[in-house]
Amino acid sequence: MKYRCTTCDREFPDGIPEGAVQLTSRHRGRRAISYRLTDGSIHSLHEIKPMTPEHKHKLFHKKTPRSNCRFCYPPEPQPEPPVELLQEVQSPVPEPIMVDEVKEPDEIEDELTAITILAEAFRRSKKNSR
């Protein structure tokens, strides 16, 4: 953690120095805590939290969008480049086998209409209408 003195603006990037004696405690919020260092100096240190771009966006201009903010105006997604298709050597397609036996249309119709109950109902209605 990084700390900064509120009195002299000195930064402590490695945290609170070893041997420092805490003089005050944090009551509430972001108040600084006073420490007496080994050299006898007294500093009121508070923790420095890094400001992320998203946090800056929320804090400073969420209500008033800016044209150069990537959170106000996110970039449009780039289309993915086309993937090159691999052309593999495939075996030739076998020629269709010709069937010498040809069924009569009545036989085909009988096989197809017998599949469902509804087809049976249509067949009955045709017989009754004749």
Image (spheres, helix red, strand yellow):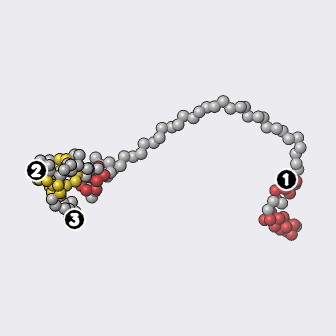
Q: Nearer the viewer, mark 1 or mark 2?
A: 2
> Please, what secondary structure does the residue beneath circle 1 have?
helix
> Could you tell me residue 37's position as x and y percent?
14, 50
Mark number displayed over residue 28: 3
Q: Nearer the viewer, mark 1 or mark 3?
A: 3
Q: Nearer the viewer, mark 2 or mark 3?
A: 2
Q: CA distance from mark 1 to mark 3?
A: 88 Å
Q: Looking at the image, do the residues carrying marks 1 and 3 touch, with CB atoms under 8 Å apart?
A: no
- Compare marks 1 and 2 and give the one earlier in the sequence: 2
Which residue: 88% across, 48% down?
A: 103
Other-residue count near label 2 (Cα within 10 Å), few / some / many at <14 / 14–19 / ≥20: few
- The residue at which mark 1 appears reads as 108
Q: Is residue 117 left or right of residue 27?
A: right
Q: Nearer the viewer, residue 59 or 79?
A: 59
- The residue at which mark 2 appears reads as 40
Q: Is residue 23 left or right of residue 77?
A: left
Tally of numbered tags: 3
Q: Looking at the image, do the residues carrying marks 1 and 2 touch, with CB atoms under 8 Å apart?
A: no
Q: Quadrant of residue 79?
A: top left
Q: Residue furthest top?
A: 89
Which residue: 28% across, 53% down?
A: 55
> Please, what secondary structure does the residue beneath circle 2 have?
loop
Indicate the amino acid at tag 2.
Gly
Quadrant showing the C terminus: bottom right
Q: Nearer the viewer, residue 120 or 36?
A: 36
Indicate the amino acid at tag 1.
Ile
Please, is residue 3 above or below residue 86 in the view? below
Which residue: 22% across, 46% down?
A: 13
Q: Is residue 25 left or right of residue 73?
A: left
- Compare marks 2 and 3 and give the one earlier in the sequence: 3
Q: CA distance from mark 1 to mark 2?
A: 106 Å
Which residue: 15% across, 59% down?
A: 23
